[in-house]
Image (tube, grey):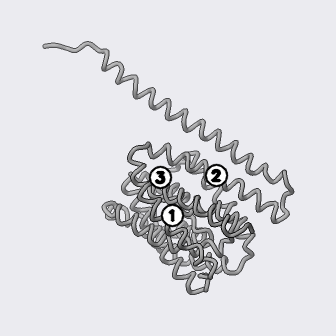
Amino acid sequence: MPPIDTALIVLAGIALFAAFVNGALGYGFSSLTVPVGLVFYANRVLNPALVLIEVFVNLYVLFINRSGVPAVWRRVFPILIGLLPGIGIGAYALASLEPVWIKFATYSIILPLILLQAAGWRRPFQSTWLVGLPFGTTLGILYSVTTISGPPLAILFNNQGLVKDEFRAGLALVRVTESCMTAFVYYKVGLFITESTDILPVLAGCAVVGIPLGAYFIRRMDAETFRRICMSFDAWVVGFGLSRVLIELNLMASPWAYSVMAGTILIDVYLLYVFFSARKAVSRDSQVPADLAAHSPSVRH
């Protein structure tokens, strides 16, 4: 492990950026902080501090999006019930398994989720108890092991066709529930250790500064473009982290392990090309009717 000052500086930098993204999009604090943070810290150190910060961050996001709660709470209720057993299973796994295997599982699970989200995967369906309960349990395991739930939730809510206010309210409801429950379970199984409390002030300061800045900035930028760029950053970092863990576990030798990162970058560059090409085509199509209207002769009566 590098000197603690170096680790804290890097952690503060990525946490500030992640808080900025969270303020802009309503999620992203953990999904951006964890991949970089795991290079320096084990999940058992990083997760408890992140969960405590997310309790307050998610409550804030829920408060500012409270107007959308009445329209969406029935859809997310099965997910909230499903979270209960999942969080318990995940917390037990976090306390029991070797840290390096937890890192491997974290990177391996979230990388395909990020790429699916970046690809704009769409399979419209309705949220029912048959879908919500198993999804909630799986999400609870994922969150309590990694503190990440934004990518799968974003995929689910986008495929349900939630509008902006409903999307953010539903996301906040689930994340408030999972962060509060996970913090309680972590406390019960003794995961709040000294190393976690040492990095807590750094994460808290970054959240206090970054979230309001992100909320202010997003009013002046296209949210979808910003979100897509953040996903690319996340995918590249996760690809790097997975390559490092493969070497650490002796599953692949260096430099061949970095082919995972290279493959991730190539896939994401292609998805970026598709994304910006589609947006350029939409912009061009919308401009044509406007130009026709501007040059058409006025009709006088």
Of the residues under marks 1 and 3, which one precedes in the sequence? 3
Q: Residue at x 64, y 64 (%)?
A: 37
Q: Quadrant of residue 196?
A: bottom right
- Residues at badges 2 and 3 in contact (C-beta under 8 Å)? no
Which residue lies under the disc numbered 2? 235
- Residues at badges 1 and 3 in contact (C-beta under 8 Å)? no
Which residue lies under the disc numbered 3? 158
As drawn, 297 above or below 242 = above
| Image quadrant where one finds the C terminus | top left
| Image quadrant where one finds the N terminus | bottom right
Q: What element carries label 2?
A: helix
Of the residues under marks 1 and 2, which one precedes in the sequence? 1
Q: What element carries label 1?
A: helix
Looking at the image, which is closer to me, 30 or 117?
30
Amino acid at pointer 1: Cys
Q: Where is residue 275 in the image (x, y as percent from the top left)?
A: 55, 38
Q: Position of residue 158 (x, y in %)?
A: 47, 52
Q: How crowded is mark 3: few (under 14 residues within 10 Å), some or many (20 or more)?
A: many
Q: Where is residue 96 in the image (x, y as percent from the top left)?
A: 70, 80
With 163 as the anchor, is 114 left or right in this view? Answer: right
Disc sitting over residue 224 in the figure: none
Looking at the image, which is closer to me, 159 or 233?
233
Q: What element carries label 3?
A: helix
Amino acid at pointer 3: Asn
